[in-house]
Image (cartoon, grey):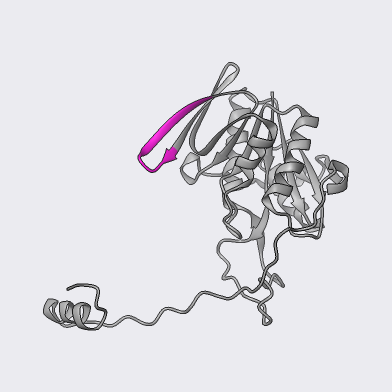
Amino acid sequence: MKALVAVKRVIDYNVKVRVKADNSGVDLSNTKMSINPFDEIAVEEAMRLKEAGVIDEVIVASIGPKESQEQIRAALALGADRGVLVLTDDKPYPLQVAKILKSIAEQESTDIILLGKQAIDDDNNQTGQMLAALMGIGQGTFASEVKVEGDKVHVTREVDGGLQTVALDLPAVITTDLRLNEPRYAKLPNIMKAKKKPLDEKTPADFGVDMISKQEIIKVVPPAERKAGIKVGSVDELVDKLRNEAKVIQ
């Protein structure tokens, strides 16, 4: 059984994002880049399934510039077997990513496709759903628990009312949520071994995907700075300010 895990190169979640002076986008110069945190959880889950004897091979795929191989190598250092880098300098949008992943999954005959539920740079939360629709297979989104039993995978997912468990026929698409697991750290010997693991380079054209965007970014601006808070001396003063200044209570 094979697992395909998609990883995205994003600004490290500990880094404060800077907007370009011309408001055309986010400034990536001299910025630390990492695997999207939700994708890290997907890699970890694939490794746990492999260690449990459920998965025989884990393939990691990323779509982006040449530098994205750093994120693939990071996943290989965590135990994945090989990588596929689809080279493009264009910003890939969810439908384009889904089409490419569909082709890779079908070529590799993967049984489980794992993705983070969303990327922290654009927060679209669309790729997994689009991929399942394009492939005509089941999907378990916002997964907080994954169990493979025979030819089915049971996914416990977080919904507004609590938890819901769905049974999906394989192959299936699973998008991972924060509470699914805690990703491990790569050990130095595994980081060195990852440099020798196979990494194939492709282009979107190899999969018949056009990277021309149907969207246009008009402007990117930083969020408004919050004003400093104030201290009040009593409950009565607090109520007075909420009623007469903030006007949030009657």
**222 shown above or below 173:** below
Residue in the image at 67% along x and 61% along y: 33
Magenta-tinted stretch: 158-167
The quarter holding residue 168 reads top right
Q: Quadrant of the C terminus?
A: bottom left
Estimate the x, y position of residue 126 in percent, counting from the top left. 60, 47
Looking at this rendering, what residue extends furthest in the left direction?
A: 236
Q: List the single residue furthest toward the front.
A: 214
Query: Residue shown at 58%/67% (left/top)?
Result: 15
Magenta segment, principal secondary structure?
strand
Q: Give percent across and percent down for residue 68.
A: 75, 54
- The image shows residue 118 at horizontal and vertical percentages of 57, 50
Q: Residue furthest top?
A: 150
Q: Quadrant of the N terminus?
A: top right
Q: Is residue 11 shown above or below 48?
A: below
Q: Is residue 30 left or right of residue 206?
A: left
Q: Is residue 204 magenta?
A: no
Residue 226 visible here: yes
Instruction: Tell me, yes or no, whether the highlighted magenta stretch contains residue 160.
Output: yes
In this rendering, the count of numbered labels is 0
- Image quarter of residue 105: top right
Q: Nearer the viewer, residue 218 or 51?
A: 218
Please report the residue visible at 83 percent of the width from the left and 48 percent of the height from the top. Answer: 204
| Nearer to us in this view, 69 or 92 | 92
Residue 216 in the image: state x and y as whole percent.
Answer: 70, 66
Task: Write the residue at 80% across / 54% down.
Answer: 211
